[in-house]
Amino acid sequence: MRPTAILALVALALPLTLGPLGCAVEPTDSLRGGAAGGGSEEATAGGEAGDDAPMVAADDGVAPTDPSGAAFTDPAGAGVEGFAPGAGTTEVRSTANVNLRTGASTSHTILAVVPNGTVVKLLSTTLNNGFLRVEYRGTAGWSHSNYYAPTAPSSGAPSGGGTSGGSVSGGPSPANAIARARASVGFSYWWGGGAWLGSGPSSSTRGSCSGSCPSCSHSGRYGADCSGMVGKAWQYGDVDLADNSHPYSTFDFARGSSRWSSVSRGALRGGDAMVYNSNGAGHIVLYERGDGWGSPTVFECRGCAYGCVYNTRNFTSAYGGVRRSGF
């Protein structure tokens, strides 16, 4: 047998693991107790769940879904005013996957879909027909104010097992893990990265990701991928948020360790994680609150197209709960 044929057979026999870097695809099954369905949330293995998935724009009044199963939202009627930013506000955060349009009405052309949890630049604090003038990834347009909020997610008393309070500089605890994860929201996705600022992102610090991971490129000093964010939130590796550190991958988090243990999704508490890893594909999120088998609210660095976000969505039955030792 030729040497090249032998190498090919050996390669097929070896298990695929990602090692310490990146996050990979997840199955699309999003029903409680359902079996993992065909396809995946993204187009490329080795990327993070949702990374580089095509954003499908919706006609107003219709609720199609993006590849992660989340509905796009845009009001069917004009003239409904929602969030009104105060004077001096320069950035806002989307609270749903919302259309960016060429003008301030639903009759204007859709330029892009702003993913849930994305921090965008606010170009004007004046509402026009209920729409905000914003800039997303270098594209200026109009997006409805119903689906925007202040950049910092609310840290009010959560329900369903959540944890309030916390500090980005305190020692390991569930509340502090949530505070550290919250600070990552708005920073870019960085394959193999784990660094952000406790004060949150700005236009000059959030960084940017382009391309299809793992062959994606990142610019800037700050950003994280899914496992880099959870590892940093749990204070493993270099605990300084501003220093890049990525000690574990989803391959590690999905397996037993003295540093964490499995927990039922029905018993999740704030600061726990939900992880999936199989055949070289995986993703991990930091749980804040809600029904672990329904649509929990989580922090996640979701991919180039999303960055690090704070959102509520459902997860496949392939995910398991994980709790850090000491939590």
Image (cartoon, rainbow, N blue to C red):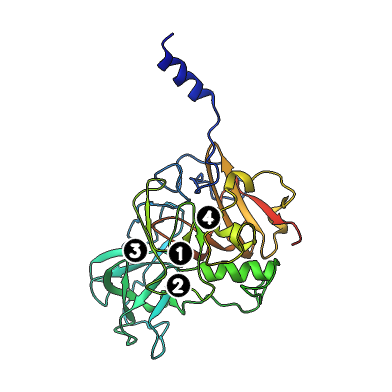
Kindly check if marks 2 and 1 are in contact, taking CB atoms under 8 A apart as contact: yes
Q: As drawn, which residue projects farthest toward the bottom?
A: 87
Instruction: Tell me the kind of residue under disc 2.
Output: Pro
Q: Is residue 102 left or right of residue 42?
A: left
Q: CA distance from mark 1 to mark 3?
A: 24 Å
Q: CA distance from mark 4 to mark 1?
A: 14 Å
In the picture of the structure, the residue carrying the numbered disc 1 is 222
Instruction: Tell me the kind of residue under disc 1.
Output: Tyr
**Looking at this view, is 73 or 292 the one in front?**
292
Q: Earlier in the sequence, mark 2 or mark 3?
A: 3
Q: Residue at x 54, y 37 (%)?
A: 17
Instruction: Tell me the kind of residue under disc 3.
Output: Val
Instruction: Tell me the kind of residue under disc 4.
Output: Cys
Query: Does dot 2 land on a helix, a strand or a loop?
Result: loop
* Neighbour tally class for label 2: few under 14, some 14-19, many 20 plus, Cα within 10 Å: many
Q: Earlier in the sequence, mark 4 or mark 2?
A: 2
Q: Residue at x 62, y 68 (%)?
A: 178
Residue 113: give its label: 3
Q: Earlier in the sequence, mark 1 or mark 3?
A: 3
Which tag is nearer the camera, tag 4 or tag 3? 4
Which tag is nearer the camera, tag 4 or tag 2? 2
Q: CA distance from mark 4 to mark 2?
A: 17 Å
Query: Does dot 1 land on a helix, a strand or a loop?
Result: loop
Which tag is nearer the camera, tag 2 or tag 3? 2
Q: Residue at x 26, y 78 (%)?
A: 104
**Looking at this view, is 109 or 193 the one in front?**
193
In the picture of the structure, the residue carrying the numbered disc 4 is 226
In the picture of the structure, the residue carrying the numbered disc 2 is 201
**Looking at this view, is 40 or 325 the one in front?**
325
Query: Does dot 3 land on a helix, a strand or a loop?
Result: strand
Kindly check if marks 4 and 1 are in contact, taking CB atoms under 8 A apart as contact: no
